[in-house]
Amino acid sequence: MILYFTGTGNSRYIAERIAVALGDELLSMNDRIKAGAHSPVETDERLVIVTPTYAWRIPRIVRDWLTETDFPCGTQTWFVMTCGSEIGNAAGYNQALCREKQLTYMGTAQIVMPENYIAMFNAPQAEEARQIVAKAEPDIDRVISAITANQAFPPTRNNLYDRFMSGPVNPIFYSFFVKANAFTASDVCTGCGQCARLCPTNNITIQNGKPVWGGDCTHCMACICRCPAEAIEYGKRSLGKPRYHFEAL
């Protein structure tokens, strides 16, 4: 089974590529998380988890859902992590999660995809994004080949910098930066409600025809990057920046 979590489509695209190549079932963690569903997930002996990188680890929302969900048949587990540049020592935490869940850890693969975290960085324009995706295709093929052959992924880089970023920096980043209070909707908002439908934490409600954010944001950027009217801003940090989601390519 292929499980995926996505904000703006990068991880979904890769998960779909893997599922088609392997002939495996595809399951959206977004849907399960949004519904608060933690019923056991029946898999075969192969479990592939495709997820973005948040602060040099898998997103906490993904970690928590995996921790609270049983996988009665899943034994061998591969992690495929999309990122804008690097995943740090995420592999060490993925391996620890597998030990906790009594799953056989088969490694972590890093795949660089277009940046979407416009709360801090710049997303690429469409043509540059297409080039980044094209460059990632051989890496996706190598991931598929390894899983098909039942082989572990090669070890990822694990130096002092990686351990520092995934270690002490990760909780600091969440504490100081992962907040929703900077999100606002301008007057061009149509009140379509897509942001609320996409939000995996049900953190957005539509009040008086506009979105209102609560306190349970995971910074997936789905609301701001997929707003059809581009009405959402993240304070001044997103002003003038291109929005990115995979389907727009």
Image (spheres, helix red, strand yellow):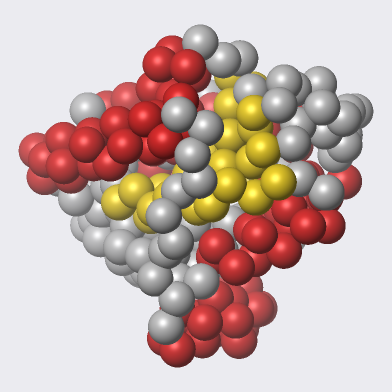
Q: Against 112, is 14 above or below? A: above
In the figure, residue 235 lies in which quadrant? bottom left
| Residue 144 x/y as whole percent | 39, 30
Quarter that holds the N terminus: top right
| Left or right: 40 in relation to 56 | right
| Residue 209 x/y as whole percent | 60, 33
Residue at x 30%, y 31% (from the top left corner): 141
| Residue 216 x/y as whole percent | 73, 56
Is residue 214 something that shows in the picture?
no
Is residue 115 something that shows in the picture?
yes
Query: Observer-nearest residue: 83 or 229?
Result: 83
| Left or right: 62 in relation to 226 | right
| Left or right: 52 in relation to 106 | left
Q: Against 238, is 25 above or below? A: above
Residue at x 22%, y 28% (from the top left corner): 249
Q: Against 108, is 22 above or below? A: above
Residue at x 41%, y 55% (from the top left corner): 154
Residue at x 55%, y 62% (from the top left corner): 91
What is the number of callouts on the image?
A: 0
Query: Observer-nearest residue: 220 or 235?
Result: 220
Query: Observer-nearest residue: 186 or 123?
Result: 123
| Residue 81 x/y as whole percent | 46, 49
